[in-house]
Image (cartoon, grey):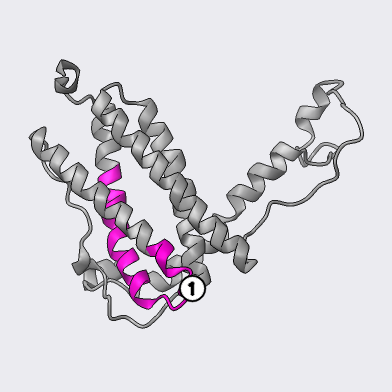
């Protein structure tokens, strides 16, 4: 179709380039996870995540070549020491996959919204479907093992209530009289709190994985 021959816009270049870098970074780390995971229920989820990244890299490589776009300099197997001792628990690996899936859904949805070309839209729609499947697999295993981190519970309201005045908007101001958080605020806060504990755990051990000294020093 003629539509598929439209030149790449800055938006398309940005999301495709970013996608390639993200998947190239995921591949060696997931290879390490596959090699060190011990739980036979968690391992297939990691292998599925690794398979998706591999498929994405192959598609994007072919796409860039067809568009005569330079292949981005991403990460490779040489950047990770696959023989390093086990640095992460199996539970952490599963949580990492779930967080990766959540971030992927947001990123792919945003990328889809930037693209008009039918072939690129089809790619990101497929990525969304695959990431949903990955999230489902990881979440099901976490629930079965009793390690899924649920959002905080609150009481069901007895009746519908309305905001009476503008003072509600200043309820979180430390200089004003505080008010209880509402359900939307609690949901977003709890969602954003999750990375604050697993990201430091990941970074604290990741310096032992790189093969190259220059990467360890960064």
- Main SS, magenta residues: helix
Q: Quadrant of residue 2?
A: top left
Label 1 packing within 10 angstroms: few (<14), some (14-19), many (20+): some
Pinpoint residue 167: horizontal percent, then vertical percent.
82, 26
In this rendering, the count of numbered labels is 1
Q: Residue furthest top?
A: 2
Magenta-colored stretch includes residue 132: no
Pinpoint residue 41: horizontal percent, then vertical percent.
48, 70
Pinpoint residue 30: horizontal percent, then vertical percent.
34, 64
Left or right: residue 21 versus residue 129 is left
Q: Is the C terminus in the top left, top right, bottom left or bottom right quadrant? A: bottom left
Query: Which residues are the magenta region?
Result: 19-46
Left or right: residue 50 versus residue 151 is left
Q: Which residue is mark 1?
A: 90
Q: Relative to 89, does residue 103 appear above or below in the rendering? A: above
Q: Is the N terminus in the top left, top right, bottom left or bottom right quadrant? A: top left
Q: Residue furthest bottom?
A: 85
Q: Quadrant of residue 174?
A: top right
Q: Is residue 163 visible?
A: yes
Q: Residue at x 26, y 67 (%)?
A: 215
Left or right: residue 94 versus residue 175 is left
Give the camera-side residue of 76 and 179: 76
Magenta-colored stretch includes residue 30: yes
Q: Is residue 218 visible?
A: no
Pinpoint residue 196: horizontal percent, then vertical percent.
56, 58
Helix, strand or loop for disc 1:
helix
Q: Residue at x 30, y 31 (%)?
A: 122
Q: Relative to 5, does residue 60 appear above or below in the rendering? A: below
Q: Residue at x 9, y 39 (%)?
A: 65
């Amino acid at each position: 179709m003629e539509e598929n021959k439209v030149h790449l816009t800055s938006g398309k270049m940005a999301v495709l380039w970013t996608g390639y870098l993200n998947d190239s970074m995921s591949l060696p780390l997931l290879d390490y996870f596959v090699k060190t995971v011990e739980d036979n229920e968690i391992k297939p989820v990691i292998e599925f995540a690794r398979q998706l990244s591999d498929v994405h890299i192959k598609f994007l490589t072919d796409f860039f070549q067809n568009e005569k776009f330079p292949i981005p300099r991403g990460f490779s197997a040489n950047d990770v020491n696959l023989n390093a001792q086990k640095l992460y628990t199996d539970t952490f690996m599963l949580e990492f996959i779930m967080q990766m899936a959540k971030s992927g859904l947001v990123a792919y949805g945003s990328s889809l919204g930037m693209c008009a070309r039918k072939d690129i839209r089809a790619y990101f729609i497929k990525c969304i479907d695959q990431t949903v499947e990955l999230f489902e697999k990881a979440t099901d295993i976490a629930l079965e093992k009793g390690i899924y981190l649920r959002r905080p519970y609150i009481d069901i309201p007895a009746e519908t209530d309305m905001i009476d005045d503008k003072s509600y908007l200043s309820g979180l101001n430390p200089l004003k009289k505080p008010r209880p958080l509402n359900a939307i605020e609690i949901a977003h806060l709890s969602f954003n709190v999750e990375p604050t504990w697993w990201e430091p755990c990941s970074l604290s051990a990741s310096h032992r994985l790189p093969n190259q000294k220059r990467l360890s020093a960064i």
